[in-house]
Image: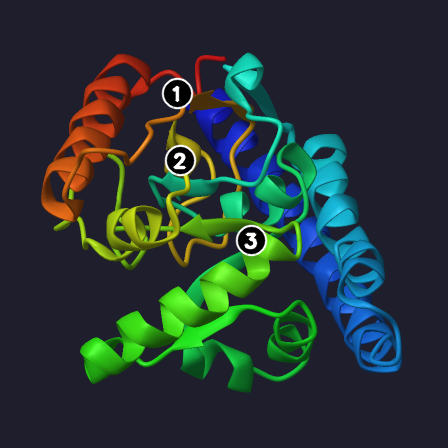
Amino acid sequence: MRSRRACLALVVVRSTLLALVQIILTPIFAVAALLSFPFDALTRYRIITLWSRLVIAAAKSICGVRYRVEGLQHLPATPAIIVSKHQSAWETLAFQVIFPPQVWVLKKHLLRIPFFGWGLAMMNPIAIDRGSGMRALRQTREQGSQRLRDGFWIVIFPEGTRVAPGDKAKYQMGGAWLAVETETPLLPVALNSGELWGKRAFLKYPGEITVRIGAPIAPEGLKPGALNRRIEDWIESEMRTIAGTARSG
């Protein structure tokens, strides 16, 4: 019992230290993001994502949150659309370390978050109102096509929100639809980050997160619905094999 309490107390202390690091770094990089406005998109990206790299490094050194990436050999030479499971805020930071320069399809209201939203806005996201239907799809296609031409990868979380380990939400077709419209391969990703860094959870537990990257899926000859089902089937199948392994890592 004492050992468990001591371990929990250590997790609390370390999580508090990580939170303090984030509190110190975030305003600094929010200002840096605003000052980076005159630069081109890629230069802004490199400046702003230094924040994410520092937080991921701090999470490893302070809280013991490590990770391993499987399937890096599947990364294509040209920009792709990353379609990933979403369990935690961790992957929104770590993907900037793991993958080439990227933009995200995200909810427009996130840009209004003080400091954090400023940095997001300077990274050229595809910020949509999910309730606007076809208008959101047209915006995704137009801006997504431009971002791909500019050399950026696109990150989409098809379930639309973070889901707890073991849970599953409906897979929206936006990523598959964009892939078909732009003739761009989809790159499926499974991960178990929520086992260490839970949704809206203050405590960050030590362990090793697995990020598993699948082979690209070409959209040629497929309709968005069929492509979306292939992505969902692959991700959910891989999730079953890595579930419950992070804290024992």
Image coords of residue 187 (percent x, y): 41, 32
Residue 133 position (above or below residue 146): below
Earlier-in-chain disc, 3 versus 2: 3
Earlier-in-chain disc, 2 versus 1: 2
- Tell me which amino acid carries mark 3: Leu
The residue where tag 1 is placed is 214
Marks 3 and 1 in Cβ contact (< 8 Å): no
Image coords of residue 199 (percent x, y): 37, 53
At a point 17% along the width and 36% down the height, the residue shown is: 222
Q: CA distance from mark 3 to mark 1?
A: 20 Å
Where on the picture, by quarter, is residue 87?
top left
Decide if residue 148 is in sight here.
yes
At a point 17% along the width and 47% down the height, the residue shown is: 224
Q: Which corner quadrant holds the N terminus?
A: top left
Q: Looking at the image, is mark 2 or mark 1 nearer the viewer?
A: 2
Q: Is residue 130 left or right of residue 186?
A: left
The residue where tag 3 is placed is 148
Q: Is residue 3 left or right of residue 141?
A: right
Of the pair 64 and 243, the residue shown nearer to us? 243
The residue where tag 2 is placed is 185
- Disc number at residue 102? none
Q: Looking at the image, is mark 3 or mark 1 nearer the viewer?
A: 3
- Tell me which amino acid carries mark 1: Gly
